[in-house]
Image (spheres, rainbow, N blue to C red):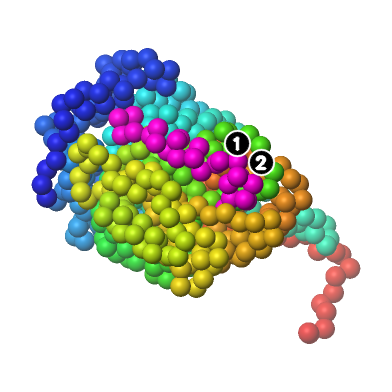
């Protein structure tokens, strides 16, 4: 592959912009490089100063015989070496998982002091991530491998830090709170317990390289499981460094294994190790394969073609336009919660919403990473999708639809201006068009359509026919409209009201799909208990046996 290089001017501009904190102040890089846990200088990683990721298994950091070279998504330079574990090198991971009993590393009746250990680890991790030099280090590391604006990268670190605060002290043991029900006679009582699965695996994507793996990993550990973690190789350097920080905060080295390999090898590990549960976040195609291969022992947070409906009551037009822009194009649209389709009531069309969306989209630029590389869809594929959509009668390009200019993003990635295509509602609903229109493009791309007052049922029919039901937004303060739409939809994380959005997975509310028994949540006590534990009932019946008891007749 031809190596592409950024211009000296672009690189200097990028360094000046990206070495500032969220207040615009120049950050002290020397402080970040002096962190005790880190093994790299986040600002200096390049073709000439490459860094490496290691595997972690049975308490030891290890390399492999072969390595994959990860390229800088902004210029194509090889800058990170990642283990390319082979079939001959996975046996330690399999043995490590098999060594964990089904009752886990701790549970309410065994090793309960470990609940306190993890409360303490969480408190220390929260304190560490609150230090400006640590939060800046991780925000910049995220930017280096999954380019997004500094504000977006720092928000990921902040959510993770607050999550650790939420589960400090006694909060971990509160996750295992039990209940008791009186029995039928003296000495009998039934007790419901949250029980771990034991050996588990976690597979996470590239777009949130810190938040998703950390929140799911800690949830698994809190409940007593032993996890094997696999993160997308393009961004696994972030969790390599985070695990080192967690070890500094008291995480036992043997509690978590960390593997880097391709999908074929990971599938082999899963089939041979037979983990009791696997959490997968990523594409629907892979999710469905894993569900079959693992005989249903999965929890899934797969792709989402996420919708937003603007109701009849038009207000706060500038604010709503800004939220729509953030939902569709922040992180270059690479969020599983990104706004994929916008259903506008005709009143919003009359209020000039689309021109405002175009103005906001055109503010985005590569220099500050408010738009940037698309890591799973090439420019060619995105433009081909645009052309196919424009063949639908009445479809038109509203804005975008062109490659980014003056960049050095390698051809294996995508580089597209924020794009919106209008498709008439009646055309969307046609069988020949529906699958095309609702194909998720994991980039800065959305469909926009409008509907009349008497066409809400058509809009809800389109929502009903969609396959994934992750996030949604109903933008209205009309209570009757809200009740109608909310009562006839299913998306697991739905925002409602004039400030409603589709994106945002903070630590203070459930984030996950609905309508699928395999659906996984993240971040909250309910999500952790659902995903990382099962219900166990123990019925105590200790007597005494009544003095009047006699042997009954056979039944």
Say whether residue 40 is left or right of residue 270.
Answer: left
Residue range in magenta is 343-369
The kind of secondary structure the magenta stretch mainly shows is helix
Q: Is residue 226 visible?
A: no
Say whether residue 11 is left or right of residue 494.
Answer: left
Helix, strand or loop under label 2: loop
| Crowding near the residue tagged with mark 2, few <14, some 14–19, many ≥20 C-alpha atoms within 10 Å | some
Q: Residue at x 11, y 32 (%)?
A: 48
Q: Residue furthest right?
A: 548
Can you say whether 369 is above or below 543 in the image? above
Say whether residue 163 is left or right of residue 547.
Answer: left
According to the picture, the residue beneath numbered tag 2 turns out to be 314
Q: Residue at x 33, y 65 (%)?
A: 272
Q: Report x, y in % for residue 396.
A: 43, 55
Q: Report x, y in % for residue 531.
A: 53, 53
Q: Report x, y in % for residue 283.
A: 40, 58
Q: Residue at x 42, y 71 (%)?
A: 292
Q: CA distance from mark 1 to mark 2?
A: 7 Å
| Crowding near the residue tagged with mark 1, few <14, some 14–19, many ≥20 C-alpha atoms within 10 Å | some
Helix, strand or loop under label 1: helix
Q: Pick the residue in front: 89 or 204.
A: 204
Q: Residue at x 47, y 47 (%)?
A: 338
Can you say whether 476 is above or below 551 in the image? above
Q: Residue furthest bottom?
A: 554
Q: Are marks 1 and 2 in contact (CB under 8 Å)?
A: yes
Q: Quadrant of the C terminus?
A: bottom right
Say whether residue 19 is left or right of residue 544.
Answer: left
Residue 137 falls in image quadrant: top left
Q: Report x, y in % for residue 274.
A: 39, 64
According to the picture, the residue beneath numbered tag 1 turns out to be 317
């Amino acid at each position: 592959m031809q190596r592409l290089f950024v211009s000296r001017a672009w690189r200097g501009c990028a360094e000046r912009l990206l070495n500032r904190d969220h207040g615009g102040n120049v950050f002290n890089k020397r402080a970040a490089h002096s962190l005790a846990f880190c093994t790299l200088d986040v600002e200096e990683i390049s073709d000439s100063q490459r860094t490496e990721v290691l595997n972690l298994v049975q308490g030891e950091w290890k390399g492999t015989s072969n390595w994959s070279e990860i390229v800088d998504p902004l210029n194509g330079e090889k800058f990170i070496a990642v283990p390319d574990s082979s079939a001959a090198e996975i046996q330690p991971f399999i043995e490590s998982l098999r060594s964990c009993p089904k009752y886990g590393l701790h549970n309410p009746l065994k090793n309960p002091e470990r609940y306190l250990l993890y409360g303490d680890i969480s408190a220390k991790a929260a304190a560490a991530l609150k230090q400006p030099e640590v939060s800046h280090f991780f925000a910049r590391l995220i930017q280096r491998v999954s380019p997004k604006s500094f504000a977006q990268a720092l928000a990921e670190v902040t959510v993770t830090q607050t999550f650790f605060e939420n589960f400090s002290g006694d909060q971990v043991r509160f996750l295992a709170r039990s209940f008791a029900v009186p029995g039928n006679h003296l000495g009998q009582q039934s007790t419901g317990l949250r029980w771990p699965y034991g050996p588990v695996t976690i597979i996470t994507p590239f777009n949130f390289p810190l938040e998703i793996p950390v929140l799911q990993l800690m949830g698994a550990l809190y409940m007593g499981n032993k996890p094997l973690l696999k993160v997308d190789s393009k961004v696994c350097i972030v969790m390599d460094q985070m695990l080192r920080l967690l070890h500094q905060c008291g995480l036992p080295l043997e509690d978590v294994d960390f593997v880097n390999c391709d999908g074929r090898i990971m599938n082999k590990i899963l089939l041979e190790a037979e983990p009791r549960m696997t959490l997968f976040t990523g594409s629907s195609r892979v999710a469905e394969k894993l569900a079959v291969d693992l005989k249903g022992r999965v929890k899934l947070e797969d792709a989402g073609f996420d919708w937003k409906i603007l109701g009849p009551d038009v207000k706060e037009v500038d604010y709503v336009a800004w939220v729509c822009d953030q939902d569709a194009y922040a992180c270059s649209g690479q969020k599983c919660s990104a706004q994929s389709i916008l259903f506008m009531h005709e009143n919003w069309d009359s209020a000039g919403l689309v021109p405002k969306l175009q103005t906001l989209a055109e503010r985005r630029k590569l220099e500050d990473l408010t738009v940037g590389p698309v890591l799973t869809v090439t420019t060619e594929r995105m433009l081909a999708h645009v052309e196919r959509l424009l063949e639908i009668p009445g479809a038109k390009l509203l804005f975008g639809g062109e490659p980014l200019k003056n960049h050095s993003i390698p051809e294996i990635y995508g580089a597209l201006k924020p794009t919106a295509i209008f498709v008439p509602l009646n055309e969307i609903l046609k069988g020949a068009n529906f699958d095309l229109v609702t194909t998720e493009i994991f980039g800065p791309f959305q469909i926009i359509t409008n509907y009349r007052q008497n066409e809400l049922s058509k809009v809800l029919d389109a929502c009903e026919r969609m396959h994934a039901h992750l996030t949604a937004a109903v933008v209205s303060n009309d209570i009757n409209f809200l009740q109608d739409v909310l009562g006839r939809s299913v998306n697991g994380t739905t925002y409602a009201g004039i400030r409603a959005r589709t994106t945002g997975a903070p630590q203070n509310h459930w984030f996950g799909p609905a309508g699928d028994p395999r659906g996984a949540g993240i971040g909250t006590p309910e999500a952790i208990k659902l995903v990382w534990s099962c219900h166990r009932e123990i019925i105590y019946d200790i007597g005494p046996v009544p003095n009047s008891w006699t042997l009954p007749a056979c039944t």
